[in-house]
């Protein structure tokens, strides 16, 4: 951009990106490396940085710059860039500085304490910090909702899924709830007749780590622009130039860490594939969390758990973990497609996973809208876990409503992005197969270039140039169509 008003906007948002870079790195360190006694000082430092970013983004001078840019002769791409800057500015200026600071402090305090409280099944202790996180989230939601003319929950969800509304989610999830229970029942009955050999551990963490690093190489992760570490809850952080992913290990179960790495590598490849010349501006960053999750869930579910990919990496599994009958290619495909309703979302199979998301969506929406209080969450959780998954979680907070980092971290409105991501991922896969019918054979042969080229061309390099619907239409020929997700599940699990 050479126009003066637009150029001044670029200068401001480049500064914001650099601040965000620092915030992301110290946040990663807080979760992965920081000693426990550093939390109070780190929380204060992060809050200070969040206030500085908020001040920069809400500067009075920006309003004049946006008015001036609107009158400048900009290209279509430049207008898209200004549009995304303005969207971030309009949302930020609706929130007072004191609220931004209070939220940062409360969320850091709650998330840090949660790590210990979850281990000790300490719901009552957790509530002490969590009530403040909820109260502040409701304040934010009300301010945003009043400005946008939306519901409180929709105002928070809009931060992760711009343009999506809970009425849309109700329609999509309502459809899933109409056919998912029967599909789970049929699949469990079918798989009960199958023979599967369970892997025999223990699997030393050092060997699991070396295997994970090899799989990341297969998935073409750029190690000059990122790294793998360990955290309580797996995540992908950092920035496009320096992506940090984490996993967690259990010596009894290598499958959890392996698929966690595949999942987070999907997030990382998206970040590494964003348009580098624009990544310092909102238009060059990820379109939505649903699209972000589509990449991780495509990597894990569409690709990672496919029989062809598992056959491809079987030699690596045998090399790093030691040969055994369970690592036969046919048995691996059976192992990684087992369907068994369970307690833990991040360990859930592909088929039961949407039920975990639906119940969280229904609970957090009721919480933000003031229909329930924080104290009511366990009872609502217990009822929905039994109804949707047949699991008894009474008194088991560790494996129930304390299991996720999202709520202690204040990320209300995020959960729908996971199932939206599964649906986008299935739709992208269907589009790929339509243009490359021998895709499975290519994966089996170790040729993943078509997959990565397709994602780079249609998703990664587009950043936030288009709305989510327009991005998906341009990639696949239609906006989100959940039918692709159902077809994928029926084909994989019932052979339909």
Image (cartoon, grey):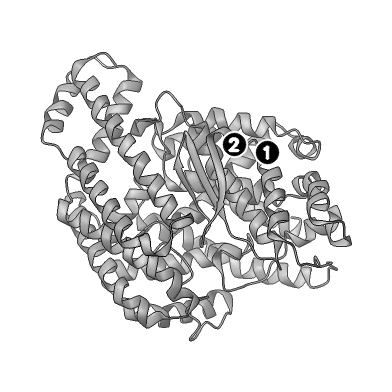
Mark 1 neighbour density, 10 Å: few (under 14) some (14–19) many (20 or more): few
Looking at the image, do the residues carrying marks 2 and 1 touch, with CB atoms under 8 Å apart? yes
Foreground disc of the pair 2, 1:
2
Q: Is residue 222 in sight in this rendering?
A: no
Examine the rendered structure and indicate whether residue 261 appears above or below residue 222: below
Residue depicted at x 70% and y 65%: 253
- Judging by the rendered image, the residue that carries numbered circle 2 is 223
Return the residue nearer the eye: 58 or 370: 58
- Kind of element beneath mark 1: helix
User: How many numbered markers are drawn?
Assistant: 2
| Percent of width and height locating residue 262 | 63, 49
Give the quarter of the image for residue 22.
top left
User: Along the polypeptide, which appears first: circle 2 or circle 1?
Assistant: 1
Examine the rendered structure and indicate whether residue 97 appears above or below residue 462: below
Examine the rendered structure and indicate whether residue 6 appears above or below residue 394: above
Residue 217's disc number:
1
| Percent of width and height locating residue 451 | 65, 34
Residue depicted at x 78% and y 69%: 190
Which quadrant, please, contains the C terminus? bottom right
Q: Is residue 71 in sight in this rendering?
A: yes
Q: Is residue 64 left or right of residue 464?
A: left
Residue depicted at x 53% and y 80%: 386
Measure the alpha-carbon separation of dots 2 and 1. 8 Å
- Kind of element beneath mark 2: helix
Q: In this view, which residue lies farthest toward the bottom?
A: 395
């Amino acid at each position: 951009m050479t126009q003066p008003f637009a150029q001044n906007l670029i200068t401001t948002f480049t500064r914001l990106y650099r601040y965000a870079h620092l915030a992301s790195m110290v946040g990663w360190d807080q979760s992965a490396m920081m000693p426990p006694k550093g939390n109070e000082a780190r929380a204060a430092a992060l809050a200070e940085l969040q206030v500085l970013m908020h001040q920069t983004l809400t500067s009075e001078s920006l309003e004049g710059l946006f008015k001036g840019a609107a009158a400048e002769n900009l290209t279509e791409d430049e207008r898209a860039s200004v549009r995304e800057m303005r969207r971030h500015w309009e949302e930020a200026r609706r929130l007072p500085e004191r609220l931004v600071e209070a939220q940062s402090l409360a969320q850091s305090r709650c998330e840090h304490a949660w790590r210990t409280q979850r281990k000790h099944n300490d719901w009552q202790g957790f509530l002490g910090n969590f009530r403040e996180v909820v109260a502040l989230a409701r304040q934010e939601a009300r301010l945003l909702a009043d400005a946008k003319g939306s519901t409180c929950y929709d105002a928070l969800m809009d931060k992760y899924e711009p343009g999506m509304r809970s009425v849309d989610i109700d329609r999509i999830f309502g459809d899933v709830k109409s056919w998912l229970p029967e599909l789970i029942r049929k699949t469990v009955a079918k798989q009960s007749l199958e023979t599967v050999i369970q892997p025999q551990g223990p699997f030393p963490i050092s060997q699991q780590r070396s295997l994970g690093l090899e799989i990341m190489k297969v998935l073409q992760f750029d190690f000059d622009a990122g790294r793998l570490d360990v955290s309580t809850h797996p995540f992908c952080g950092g920035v496009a130039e320096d992506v940090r992913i984490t996993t967690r290990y259990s010596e009894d179960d290598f499958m959890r860490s392996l698929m966690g790495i595949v999942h987070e590598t999907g997030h990382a490849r998206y970040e590494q594939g964003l348009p580098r010349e624009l990544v310092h501006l909102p238009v060059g960053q990820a379109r939505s969390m649903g699209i972000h999750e589509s990449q991780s869930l495509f990597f894990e579910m569409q690709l990672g758990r496919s029989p062809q990919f598992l056959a491809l990496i079987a030699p690596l599994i045998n090399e790093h973990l030691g040969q055994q009958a369970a690592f036969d290619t046919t048995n691996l495909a059976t192992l990684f497609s087992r369907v068994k309703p369970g307690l833990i979302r991040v360990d859930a199979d592909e088929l039961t996973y949407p039920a975990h998301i639906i119940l969280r969506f229904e609970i957090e929406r009721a919480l933000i809208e003031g229909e329930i209080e924080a104290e009511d969450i366990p009872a609502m959780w217990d009822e929905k876990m039994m109804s949707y998954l047949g699991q008894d979680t009474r008194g088991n907070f560790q494996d129930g409503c304390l299991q996720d980092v999202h709520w202690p971290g204040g990320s209300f409105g995020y959960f729908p992005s996971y199932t939206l991501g599964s649906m986008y991922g299935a739709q992208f896969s269907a589009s790929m197969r339509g243009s490359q019918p021998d895709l499975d054979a290519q994966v089996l042969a170790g040729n993943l270039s078509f997959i990565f080229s397709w994602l780079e061309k249609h998703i990664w390099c587009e950043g936030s140039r288009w709305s989510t619907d327009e991005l998906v239409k341009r990639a696949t020929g239609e906006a989100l169509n959940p039918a692709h997700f159902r077809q994928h599940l029926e084909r994989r699990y019932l052979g339909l």
